[in-house]
Image (cartoon, coloured by chain):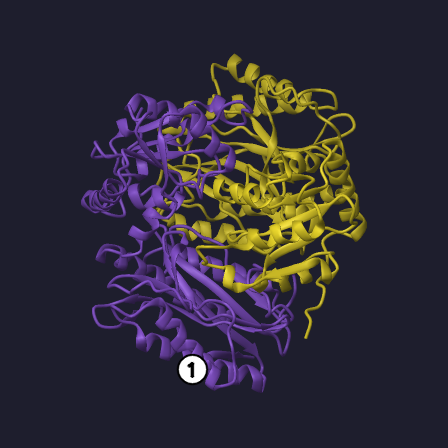
Chain colours: A yellow, B purple
Amino acid sequence: MTISKGSQAFPRTEYVRRLAAVKSEMERRDIDALVVNNAANITYLTGYTALSAYVPQGLVVSIHREEPTFILRRQDAPAAIHQTFLERGNVIGYPESLIGNPDMDGFDTVIDFLHELGVASRSLGLERGYLSAQASEKFKERLPKARIVDCTKAIAWIRGIKSDLEIAVMREAAAISDAAMLRAAEVIRPGVREADAVAEIVATLVRGANGKPGTIFRPLYLCSSPRTGTSHIMYSQDVFREGSQINLELGGIRHGYAAGLMRTFSIGAPSDRLRRLHDAEVAGMEAALNVVQPGATCSDVANAFYRMIEKQGFKKESRCGYAIGIDWLEPTASLKDGDMTELKPNMTFHLMLGNWIDEDFGYVISETFRVTESGAEVLTSAPRNLFELS
Amino acid sequence: MTISKGSQAFPRTEYVRRLAAVKSEMERRDIDALVVNNAANITYLTGYTALSAYVPQGLVVSIHREEPTFILRRQDAPAAIHQTFLERGNVIGYPESLIGNPDMDGFDTVIDFLHELGVASRSLGLERGYLSAQASEKFKERLPKARIVDCTKAIAWIRGIKSDLEIAVMREAAAISDAAMLRAAEVIRPGVREADAVAEIVATLVRGANGKPGTIFRPLYLCSSPRTGTSHIMYSQDVFREGSQINLELGGIRHGYAAGLMRTFSIGAPSDRLRRLHDAEVAGMEAALNVVQPGATCSDVANAFYRMIEKQGFKKESRCGYAIGIDWLEPTASLKDGDMTELKPNMTFHLMLGNWIDEDFGYVISETFRVTESGAEVLTSAPRNLFELS
């Protein structure tokens, strides 16, 4: 029996639009076929969100075919048929014998397909930044006549400007982020284990908001005293204490699209230093958002923040954020000094103002925003408070 | 101010033992320095579990130094000082200016360190299977006189045989897996949204069992009708219905170590086909566990399962499991026909008997076990039921 098509996050026309943009970029680079193996890029072009990328898989986009061909593990092919807009003939499962096999793997099936497609002596795009050194060499060795062009960030740049349909999904994700942050403010209490609070927070990320569940969950980061100078510890086995500070980063996710959000909590009155830093950061955030408009650069946004907090006697060493979308971070534009990427309508960013000042002292606040025709629309809407809990 | 050392999952002697095994393997391969960039391997050798591996980082093991040197993003260095057994001088943070920088990245700092260490014209081990093609080329270009040796799976093979300390942690993880599976049997009900059930299940994975929380959460897979032929969809936006079948894979995690567990649920009476498959699979599982002992091979275990279910008229195409430990799957031994890896005491496996028979029909059951001196100790202990819910 065959598996049914599931409900699709986007209409076929949306995927065709995205593929047209990719093919246009392929033509610009004179590429006949592009092997997409980055999982976020596969989600973008097909709607596939199953988590099978720990084994080889590749989506082959040919300049001559409307639909791409998705080659993945046999065991995962039904999920691809169910979740994507692709016709079932464009999903190819490779044999299970290639799993845990020291001699061959799924990329061999992708390469066989490229030979059948007739592009073995043509121009071939690869995402070499997402291929291991070993896999990349396999493509070179088995396609010796192909001209291989590195396309690591090509699709990520296209993803940078969202459609209105994508923005609608990101608004749903942002509402989930807000709900989870407000839940955190309810459950973080002295004497509570961090794990028990995180259990409630992640449960909220999954249950979602406004009747729309999170469609997947991803790591969150709850860095509490004495770990507020750290940024990527998920949580600890400690219990919250009177006087603890808690830095929390989380994100709701809808159909792959994440909306990042960070807030800082204090159990009991915050220190003067923390209060002053919070005030400076909120002022910096407002200054940064105020310069957002089409034509401004990423560097402009970052520098508006840096100048404002410097006035208050603070500095931030790290960048002020990055493009955000499927699977969180897009490896393209950064909100940092010197990044001359021009803002365009429907670009989306995580304005990430986490500031890890000392080894043992940091503070976090962030929003996810989109560029509008004339400014910024902040998608997340949790209060910009230094949450004081008791 | 400096950050304090956190509580360590293992004593320093345990890490020294692991490093001695790695250095012994380096000597065997005539390697002076090994750059470890796989996140699970870094956890194994240091205790670091913060989730910063989305940017370059490297743990440099020198044959001539007791402790390795951990080079990572400046923003993440405090987490490394806090979480690992390393002396603070052996944690080096690279500048934030290397993040989102098109020209240089953290691997340049790792390479600079290798030059300082005096190994630029010596033998250098790299985990090329975990380095992108681009990163691997950077090492070659900037260390043209080094003899580069691929060590992709070297540490994973050492990880394969656990210490009793690691087994104790895996027992804690397995107890969490059991608790989450029993929670699933409570919350999966007709009319309940999948997301609401998953929220409760992941919350249990985080809260843990026996007073020991999960220390991190990872994806789980809840594949319900009509998706029982799929294996890696996290969950859907559907509501459970009368007659639904639900295949669930999850794992508790302690200090990075996972214990995988799968069970199948039926809302209402299962079909005859499902009941027969369940009976065959449980018999196959028992047959497989019965042949586990030191000296038997992975192939023996898999074939005991395959022969038993064939007697009942079923087949399984995919392998019967794999070595398990930090970050779940170890990319070494597979329980599959032809894998002649010999079992040794304190090897641990996820005996993964998920069987996706048709596009629209599959069944799952699994256990995590360790090899003892004379047989198998099954670490997970949820009832081997086809759970019938109503």
Q: Residue furthest left?
A: B13
**Point 26% across, 71% down: residue:** B293
Q: Is residue B368 visible?
A: yes
Give the left or right position of residue A151, taking residue B319 as reference: right
Q: Quadrant of the N terminus of chain B?
A: top left
| In the rendered image, the vertical position of residue B252 relative to residue B32, given as above or below | below
Give me the chain letter of mark 1: B
Crowding around mark 1 (Cα neighbors within 10 Å: few <14, some 14 to 19, many 20+) is many
Between A30 and A152, the one lying in front of the other is A30
Residue B123: % across, % down: 31, 32
Across the whole image, how many numbered discs are drawn on residues?
Answer: 1
**Point 55% across, 77% down: residue:** B266
Give the left or right position of residue B64, taking residue B259 as reference: left
Residue A330: % across, % down: 60, 36
Residue A316: % across, % down: 48, 21
Give the left or right position of residue A153, taking residue B112 as reference: right
Between B321 and A365, the one lying in front of the other is B321
**Point 45% across, 49% down: residue:** A198
Element at label 1: helix
Q: Is residue B236 visible?
A: no
Between A135 and A342, the one lying in front of the other is A135
Q: Which residue carries the number 1 mark?
A: B308
**Point 66% across, 49% down: residue:** A114
Amino acid residing under circle 1 = Met
